[in-house]
Amino acid sequence: MQQPTSNAPASDLSETHARLTLALGPLVAFLDDPLVVEIMLNADGAIWVERRGTGMQRTEARMEPVAAEAMLRLVAADAGVELTVSKPQLAAKLPPPWGARLQAFLPPQPGALSWRDAVMAAMRVRPDRIIVGEIRDGSALELLKAWNTGHHGGLATIHPNDSGSSRADALGAVEVQGATRCDAA
């Protein structure tokens, strides 16, 4: 996680703070609440908040996707991190007074994010379940490892390599691959 390092004059810092406060919009109230331990902004604009002693709850607040992307780009620029469709992940820390860790993702371009990178990125945002549409080859083992990190499991479809193989063959290959890799570790 990169943190901004600045020797900028106080007036520049206060201008940056003002721009960030404006860009953060509805998130500021949650950032300022000492009981809030996590804030999640979904791609549909819904804002979820976890307060000490309570689970994750959906709030009435919303942030439109265009505003969310502008906010993320501003945070990335402030942190000195590149955020583009080819580098869609942002791991940064908001500047004072918040100092909150921020983990965000832009929708990637095809091929810009490997399957493993996508799973690892998903793991950073505390998923209850990991759901994948289709897995093949070594991805199956990566998915099994991800499910084995304290999550309640997930859902995936497994496809054989060719039309002559059965689903049972595909599952057997996952079992053999998993056993072989686990023995080697």
Image (cartoon, rainbow, N blue to C red):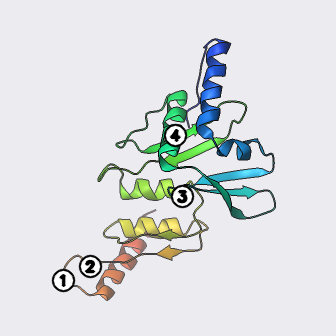
Q: Which marked residue is nearer to the observer: mark 4 or mark 3? A: 4
CA gap between label 1 and label 3 equals 33 Å
Cβ atoms under marks 2 and 1 closer than 8 Å? yes
Residue 32 on image: x %, y %: 76, 41
Which residue is labeled 3 in the image? 123
In the figure, 8 relative to 40: above or below? above
Residue 85: horizontal and vertical position, in percent? Answer: 36, 43
Which circle's residue, 4 or 3, is located before the other in the chain? Answer: 4
Q: Residue at x 54, y 58 (%)?
A: 123
Nearer-the-camera pick, 67 or 2:
67
User: Which is more N-terminal, label 3 or label 1?
Assistant: 3
Residues at circles 4 and 3 in contact by the CB criterion of under 8 Å: no
Determine crowd level at label 4: few under 14, some 14-19, many 20+ residues with C-alpha closer than 10 A.
Answer: many
Left or right placement of residue 42 versus residue 37 in this view = left
| Badge 2: residue crowd in 10 Å (few <14, some 14–19, many ≥20) | some
Helix, strand or loop under label 2: loop
Percent across and percent down for residue 118 are 43, 56
State left or right for residue 141 relative to residue 152. Answer: left
Considering the image in quadrants, where does the N terminus appear?
Answer: top right
- Amino acid type of disc 3? Met
Residue 154 vertical placement versus 119 (above, below):
below
Tag 4: amino acid: Leu
Disc number at residue 163?
1
**Residue corresponding to mark 4:** 72
Find the distance from the CA under tag 4 to the CA under tag 1: 44 Å
